[in-house]
Amino acid sequence: MINIFPFLSLTFLFLSLHHPTMADQSLHQTQPLKQIAIDYTPEACNHCPISNTIALTYDHRGGARWRSTTRFLYGTFTAKIQTPKGNTDGLNFNFYLSSLEGDKLQDEIDFEFLGKDSTIIQTNYYSNGNGNNEKIHQLGFDSSDGFHEYGIKWGDGLIEWWIDGKLLRKDERKEGDMFPEKAMYLYASIWDASCIAEGEWTGKYCGADVPYVCHYKDIHVPLKNAVE
């Protein structure tokens, strides 16, 4: 009788190195976002859980911010987003993860739209409040012209940013580097960022085409991995 166990062991090793495990697949299963919390200006945030849509408005009331009601430790987060039309100089609209907005020691993973140019997007991440990992990307389209799908895939030592099913950026933890590892909420907001870098980041707000509405739909969060 031929001993097949060495062959099976080598086959299992090959598959484990080159294919996602069941645990990895489970980690990145998603579900529609059902509930949100609104951090400020609730009258400027319109959420319909039935259609899985959210509209954030910036006008004389200022902006607004929503988040998931639970934190997640790893997983995939996606949404189809259409940014506001018109002259959006000075505004920032976004889709990001944070362990707690406002905490100086927060972990964070970002997609940020910069109002001065609707054909670019910024990605970034923070660990324990330390950032400086910004990258600017050309979208190849105008983000205000229609919906496009944006996704963050986050695992232990790995972050990927995706747009319309194509990998935009991939960062892996290097030995000795800080990397996001705290459970995080999914957030989105619209706000006037004119004060950042004296307007160089997003431009200077003029408000010529107020109100500005950022639309989110088909928002998905991890099926599992929720942390109380």
Image (spheres, rainbow, N blue to C red):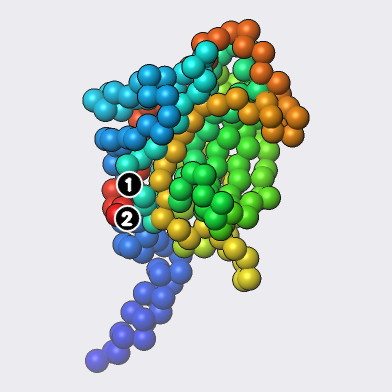
Q: In front: 206, or 41? A: 41
Residue 50 percent across, percent down from the top left: 24, 25
Residue 34 percent across, percent down from the top left: 27, 35
Q: Please, what is the three-letter code of the amino acid marked with disc 1?
A: Thr
Q: Secondary structure at mark 2?
A: strand
From the viewer's perspective, is residue 96 above or below residue 9? above
Task: Point out the image quarter for the N terminus.
Answer: bottom left
**Label 1: which residue?**
70
Q: Is residue 87 left or right of residue 78?
A: right
CA distance for labels 2 and 1: 7 Å
Q: Are marks 2 and 1 in contact (CB under 8 Å)?
A: yes
Q: Secondary structure at mark 1?
A: loop
Q: Please, what is the three-letter code of the amino acid marked with disc 2?
A: Val
From the viewer's perspective, is residue 68 above or below residue 210? below
Q: Is residue 225 left or right of residue 111?
A: left
**Label 2: which residue?**
227
From the viewer's perspective, is residue 197 above or below residue 179? above
Residue 147 percent across, percent down from the top left: 47, 23
At 40% from the left edge and 70% from the top edge, which residue is drawn?
Answer: 16
